């Protein structure tokens, strides 16, 4: 399984832990709540759902009894996906992971979006891992700039400075989050059990969602699922 597929499966399980949804609702939540999936291919969602069903982590249910019993409408009932007990257990195992995959660029935003469902000690390890990784990156960027700045034109130099400033901002943001966790404080406005709805825009990751984001206008309507 690719890392991208693993992130998608993690996000789908997390969203369905909050409540059962049909395919269109899932696509919308992946766009509006989890910014890391703004550019993902919709063609990957349904194969992912089928895999999760085959693994016993989801079940498919008719979403509308009236539609399911009215064949003359010409439309199939929407399928609702529901998390099984095995799926919940698997998701909790994923939440407890604190290795490098939890805080790499491609995965950290998705993990952070579900921090409301994550224990405090795991949150701390993921945040500290992310900060350590960025501090290492920042040190390398500074060393590279010191070696090459005399050979760079003004625009390339400014671009490198901008990249460093972005990393510095995220490190400061992580420092604030870690301080809050150590003090036993939750993020202001967070909702119990509703992590994917948290406003996480105070950070500088660039992949986290912003309130009011809408799905792409070319998203096709969902009739089968």
Image: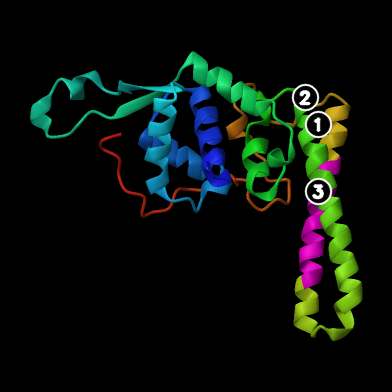
The residue lying at 81 percent from left, 48 percent from top is 133
Residue 133: mark? 3
- Which sits in the foreground, 75 or 147? 147
The residue lying at 11 percent from left, 26 percent from top is 71
- Which comes sooner in the sequence, label 2 or label 3? 2
Q: Mark 1 sits on what residue? A: 124
**Secondary structure category for the residue under label 2:** helix
Q: Position of residue 200 (x, y in %)?
A: 67, 41
- Which comes sooner in the sequence, label 1 or label 3? 1
| Magenta span | 160-175
CB within 8 Å, label 2 to label 1: yes
* Residue 153 as seen in the image, left or right of residue 64: right
Q: Position of residue 2 (x, y in %)?
A: 54, 45
Q: Is residue 221 above or below residue 22?
A: below
Residue count near mark 3 (Cα–Cα under 10 Å), binned few <14, some 14–19, many ≥20: some
- Which sits in the foreground, 130 or 187? 130
Q: Is residue 185 above or below residue 131?
A: above
Q: CA distance from mark 2 to mark 1?
A: 6 Å
Is residue 20 visible in the rendered image? The answer is yes
**Secondary structure category for the residue under label 1:** helix
Residue count near mark 1 (Cα–Cα under 10 Å), binned few <14, some 14–19, many ≥20: some
Q: Mark 2 sits on what residue? A: 120
Residue 86: mark? none
Q: Main secondary structure of the magenta part?
A: helix
Mark 2 against mark 3, which lies toward the viewer? 3
Name, please, the residue furthest toward the front. 1
Mark 1 against mark 3, which lies toward the viewer? 3
**Secondary structure category for the residue under label 3:** helix
């Amino acid at each position: 399984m690719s890392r991208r597929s693993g992130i998608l499966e993690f996000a789908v399980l997390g969203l369905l832990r909050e409540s059962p949804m049909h395919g269109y609702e899932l696509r919308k939540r992946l766009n509006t709540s989890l910014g890391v999936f703004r550019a993902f291919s919709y063609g990957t969602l349904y194969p992912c759902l089928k895999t999760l069903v085959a693994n016993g982590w989801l079940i498919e249910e008719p979403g509308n009894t009236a539609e399911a019993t009215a064949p003359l409408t010409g439309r199939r009932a929407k399928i609702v996906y529901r998390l099984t007990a095995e799926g919940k257990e698997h998701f909790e195992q994923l939440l407890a992971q604190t290795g490098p995959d939890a805080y790499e660029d491609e995965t950290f935003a998705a993990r952070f979006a579900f921090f409301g469902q994550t224990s405090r000690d795991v949150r701390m390890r993921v945040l500290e891992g992310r900060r350590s990784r960025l501090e290492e990156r920042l040190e390398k960027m500074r060393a590279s700039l010191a070696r090459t700045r005399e050979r760079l034109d003004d625009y390339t130099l400014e671009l490198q400075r901008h990249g460093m400033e972005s990393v510095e901002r995220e490190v400061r943001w992580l420092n604030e989050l870690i301080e809050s966790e150590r003090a036993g404080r939750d993020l202001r406005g967070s909702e119990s059990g509703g992590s994917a709805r948290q406003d996480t825009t105070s950070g500088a990751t660039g992949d986290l969602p912003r309130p009011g984001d809408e799905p792409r206008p070319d998203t096709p309507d969902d009739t089968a699922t």
